[in-house]
Image (cartoon, rainbow, N blue to C red):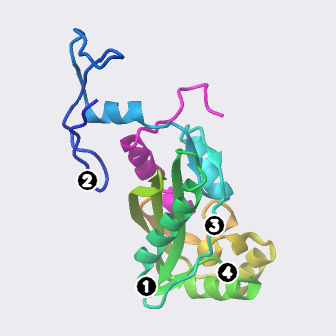
Amino acid sequence: MRREAASSRNESAGRGVRLRARTPSGIKSKVPAVRVGARAAMIIMTSSRLILASASPRRKMLLGAAGFNFDIAASGIDEVLRAGEAAEAFAERMACEKALNVAGRGGGATVLAADTIVVLGGQIFGKPADAAQARAMLRALSGNRHTVITAYAIARDGAIVERRAVRSGVRFRTLTDEEIDDYVAGGAPLDKAGAYGIQDAGAGFIAEVEGSRDNVMGLPVSEVIAALARHGIAPAPAGRSN
């Protein structure tokens, strides 16, 4: 089989791939060559197994709600910001490292990973280390507009085949100390970037969202669906999801 598909960072160009049958002895058969689109050829050649490289229940819920069948394998990568590293570059690097870590033991599967951070005035907020840090983050966000960046990366065969960072803007109303203390006491902020969740009681802190709410939750679903489709992964037919 001869490939003629050119590739870019995100997807193959649209030239066709020509498939010609051969006999076991290598003699050309009389079966005419069949031309298929580059994307169709890619799907033929690609494993349809998908692994989500995340232990996040929110990403699991979002990807499952989109109709995908997938396995879960947490990467265990430590999220450490390098000196002078920009916010978007940090999120993309973390997503790529997570994806590559799991792809190395994924048996040829397609691996999806993501990383979410909150940025306020150039300062990056990851997950708070403890309740005191969670309260400090929420006080800083109170009454202010911040940016949520979720980067996703797709890996296969030990290489990143696509990556992207998606931004959403969020504005908090002014919070009282009592509201912050009550929210932190419930334990919800400790596993979330910026110490709040748009899917739980933290939604009550939000006055406005610009962009994808799914992105704020931890996975830009529309962008991820399109990206996976470019690499031969589609939602399961209705009634066949796991």
> In the picture, which quadrant includes the C terminus?
top right
- The label shown at residue 128 is 4
Instruction: Tell me the number on the disc at residue 8.
Output: 2
Tell me the distance, in whole angstroms, between the alpha carbons under discs 2 and 3: 36 Å
Q: To which residue does mark 1 refer?
A: 85
Q: Alpha-carbon distance for marks 4 and 2? A: 38 Å
Point out the frontmost of discs 2 and 3.
2
Which amino acid lies under the numbered mark 1 shown in the image of this protein? Glu
Disc nearest the viewer among 1 and 3: 1
Q: Which mark is residue 195?
A: none
Horizontal side of residue 82 vs 24, given as left or right: right
Q: Residue tagged by mark 3?
A: 197
- The residue nearer to you, when weighing 240 against 232, is 232
Foreground: disc 1 or disc 4: 1
**Seen in the image, is 237 located left or right of residue 138?**
left
Q: Amino acid at mark 2?
A: Ser
Residue 169 visible in the snapshot: no
Q: Nearer the viewer, residue 124 or 229?
A: 229
Q: Earlier in the sequence, mark 4 or mark 3?
A: 4
The residue most toward the top is 30
Question: Where residue 110 sits: x, y (%)?
Answer: 50, 46
> Magenta segment, which residues?
213-242
Whether residues under marks 1 and 3 lie with C-beta atoms below 8 angstroms apart, the answer is no
Q: Are marks 4 and 3 in contact (CB under 8 Å)?
A: no
Q: Does the residue at mark 4 contact the one at mark 2 (Cβ under 8 Å)? A: no
Magenta stretch: includes residue 221: yes
Separation (CA) of disc 1 from disc 4:
19 Å
Assess whether mark 2 and mark 1 are in contact (beta carbons under 8 angstroms).
no
Residue 228 picture location, percent across and down: 43, 45
| Comes first in the chain, label 4 or label 2 | 2
Q: Nearer the viewer, residue 231 or 1?
A: 1
